[in-house]
Image: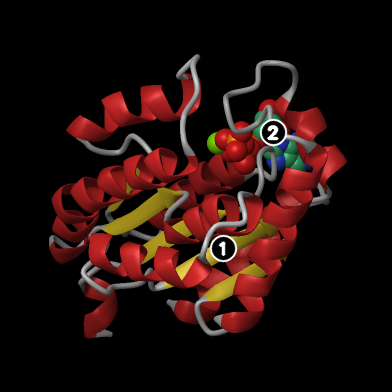
């Protein structure tokens, strides 16, 4: 199919410790074996400017206002989308991206109880109204995810249990709203069993 030769933009979403990075690497290997060209990237921090923004977003020690946080994520996304995601997709690469628009809706929207409609508007501004071709949502129990992450927590990982519950539920609401794009994966299982679910979804698309 011509479309696939243009590359697909696939995002990996879910709460901390759900297995996004692990599964992204497994899918990367799987796609390369099949002969696809791939790139791995992430938000925040997938562009030149983004690296500095990531440092602030994850490790700033002082107070960060909710709106400041939102705009930093969106600044990161705007630069990353144009200079990395779109560029690679247009060159025919499969773009595998760890977190993207749905993280902002889930964390800054549902988690921090921000205005979802405004966040949608801003996400659209950052991505020129374009959406991922596919989003894999790794749904894991909060306790299981937290155990996997361990003790070294970043600024957002240190948030309360209630915050993480809202984020998890927010993600599931997004999946209900966009069932064509967002596929929910049971991420409580072992790494191989989780990847089998990913593989099935990908095989259906390719
Ligand atoms: N299905 C699984 N079962 C058990 N352990 C897992 C599973 N998936 C990942 N892990 C382990 O849990 C830890 C966190 O996984 P990973 O880094 O992939 O999660 P993540 O979603 O990328 O987390 P973060 O949001 O913090 O970046 C890693 O040590 C990984 O090896
Ligand atoms: Mg990760």
Q: Residue at x 67, y 63 (%)?
A: 170
In the figure, 162 relative to 37: above or below?
above
Q: Is mark 1 within 8 Å of ligand 1?
A: no
Residue 109 occupies quadrant: bottom right
Neighbours of disc 1 within 10 Å: few (<14), some (14-19), many (20+)? many
Where does the image place residue 38, in percent across and percent down from the top left? 31, 51
Comparing marks 2 and 1, which lies closer to the viewer? 2
Where does the image place residue 153, in percent across and percent down from the top left? 65, 21
Q: In the visual, does 101 lie left or right of 199? A: left
Q: Report the disc number at residue 49.
A: none
Mark sitting earlier along the chain (2/1): 1
Q: In the visual, does 24 lie left or right of 206? A: right
Disc 1 is placed on an element classified as strand
Residue at label 2? 159
Residue at label 1? 136
Disc 2 is placed on an element classified as loop
Residue 186 occupies quadrant: bottom right
The reply to whether residue 139 is visible in this rendering is no
Q: In the visual, does 141 lie left or right of 69? A: right
Q: Quadrant of the C terminus?
A: bottom left
Mark 2 and mark 1: Cα distance apart in space: 24 Å
């Amino acid at each position: 199919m011509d479309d696939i030769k243009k590359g697909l933009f696939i995002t990996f979403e879910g709460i901390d410790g759900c297995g996004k990075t692990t599964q992204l690497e497994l899918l990367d290997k799987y796609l390369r074996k099949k002969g696809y060209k791939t790139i791995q990237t992430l938000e925040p921090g997938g562009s030149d400017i983004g690296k500095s923004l990531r440092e602030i977003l994850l490790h700033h020690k002082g107070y960060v206002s909710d709106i400041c946080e939102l705009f930093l994520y969106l600044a990161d996304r705007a630069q990353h989308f144009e200079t990395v995601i779109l560029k690679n997709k247009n060159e025919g690469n499969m773009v595998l991206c760890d977190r993207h628009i749905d993280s902002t809706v889930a964390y800054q929207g549902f988690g921090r109880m921000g205005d979802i409609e405004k966040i949608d508007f801003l996400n659209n501004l950052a991505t020129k109204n374009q959406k991922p071709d596919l989003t894999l949502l790794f749904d894991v129990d909060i306790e299981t995810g937290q155990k996997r992450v361990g003790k070294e927590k970043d600024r957002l990982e240190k948030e309360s249990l209630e915050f993480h519950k809202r984020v998890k539920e927010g993600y599931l609401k997004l999946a209900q709203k966009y069932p064509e794009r967002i596929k929910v994966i049971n991420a409580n299982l072992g790494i191989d069993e989780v990847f089998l679910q990913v593989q099935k979804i990908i095989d259906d698309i390719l």
